[in-house]
Amino acid sequence: MKAVIVNQNGTNQLELVEHPIPKAKEGELLIKVHTAAINRTDIVTREGKSGYLTNPILGVEVAGTIVEINGKSSFSVGDRVMGLVNGGGYAEYATMPINRAMKIPENFTFEEAAAIPEVFLTAYQTLFWIGKLQKQESVLIHAGASGVGTAAIQLAKKLCDAKVIVTAGSKRKLDFCKELGADVVINYKEQSFEEEVQKATNGFGVDVILDFIGAEYWQKNFESIKKGGRWVLIGILGGSEIEKVNLMGLMSKYIQLTGTLLTPRSDEYKAQLTKEFIENVTPYFERKEIRPIVDTMFPLEKAREAQQYMEESRNIGKIILKVNEHLS
């Protein structure tokens, strides 16, 4: 099969190679991959910075059809499924734990399906499992036009009727966030988002922050969160090291600060998250009240160009790889 790996010559470039088809172990499905999706964790892995992915083939989410089932399952060969894989997504075949597979809603294409698992599960985990977002609370979502951002906007609005405040860097992205349901949109390049958050919350600050930025936004996020708020650190696009942190400030506002990544979590954790997500969100997909956002598509052999597109922050929503194009 064709697969994309990181070359071994030290340049951290991607190569399209011939690779053996993986074998489904007990409790796994073998999937014929129709589409996969680009994630920042793939870029971090390509650069050799992750330290937790051992599969030589990149990619953590796929959509496709089942060709083999090894173990008890409610699925059948030929079923259309999507879900998280332990690496191996940038390939014509991939294995997936049975308890992590999600049936693709009939009204979704393979391209749309590949835009769901990583970002929607991440958004669900950070908003509800960690952020404990409640009905009609307020949430500040940075990188609102990203894959996770577009998922989080919809989940926060539909499941909690939350007041959604987002940041993004262009009018095009902000307008799209508004279409998805964002109540307040802030251009971080032109406005001080912490001041706008204070205005939007009558000086109280937000209940929850989804922070993709890290160090660069540390003080501004501190000023944006209310007393007792939940601050979820999910990325470090703006750096990972902060020179000075006043811990007394965190204590005096009794802020709950939690860092998280989804990819290195255990198989059991991901399975339980997938199960709850299916139960609570699938009806919204079926009614098209929540939808995956596909920005653009690249063929498998252009995986490096697809990653570069993400690195340049050009996308609104997901970047998809078409693997078996004739089947999609």
Image (cartoon, grey):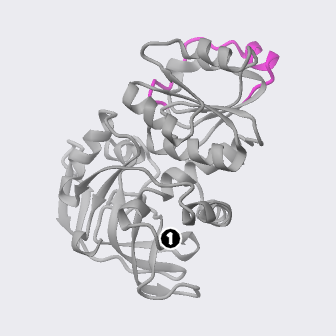
Q: Residue at x 54, y 76 (%)?
A: 98
Is residue 137 at least partly visible in the picture? Answer: yes
- What are the residue bounds of the magenta stretch? 236-256
- Residue on which the image places disc 1: 105
Give, as a three-letter code, the residue at label 1. Pro
Q: In this figure, what is the number of numbered marks?
A: 1
Residue 72 sits in quarter: bottom right
Q: Left or right? Give the position of 30 relative to 202.
A: left
* Quarter of the rendering occupied by the N terminus: bottom left
Within 10 Å of the Cα at label 1, are there few (<14), some (14-19), or many (20+) other Cα atoms? some
> Residue 35: x, y in percent?
33, 64
> Residue 262: x, y in percent?
55, 50
Asked if 307 appears above or below 99 in the picture, the reply is above
Q: Left or right? Give the position of 162 relative to 84.
A: right
Q: Residue at x 51, y 34 (%)?
A: 178
Residue 73 sits in quarter: bottom right
> Residue 322: x, y in percent?
27, 62
Q: Left or right? Give the position of 80 relative to 180.
A: left
Is residue 255 inside the magenta stretch? Answer: yes
* Quarter of the rendering occupied by the C terminus: bottom left
Majority secondary structure in the magenta region? loop
Residue 312 sits in quarter: top left
Is residue 267 inside the magenta stretch? Answer: no
> Residue 104: x, y in percent?
48, 71
Is residue 264 at least partly visible in the picture? Answer: no
Q: Residue at x 77, y 42 (%)?
A: 134
Asked if 191 appears above or below 173 in the picture, the reply is above
| Front position in the image: 155 or 264 | 155
Q: Residue at x 61, y 11 (%)?
A: 195
Which element type, helix, strand or loop, lies under badge 1? loop
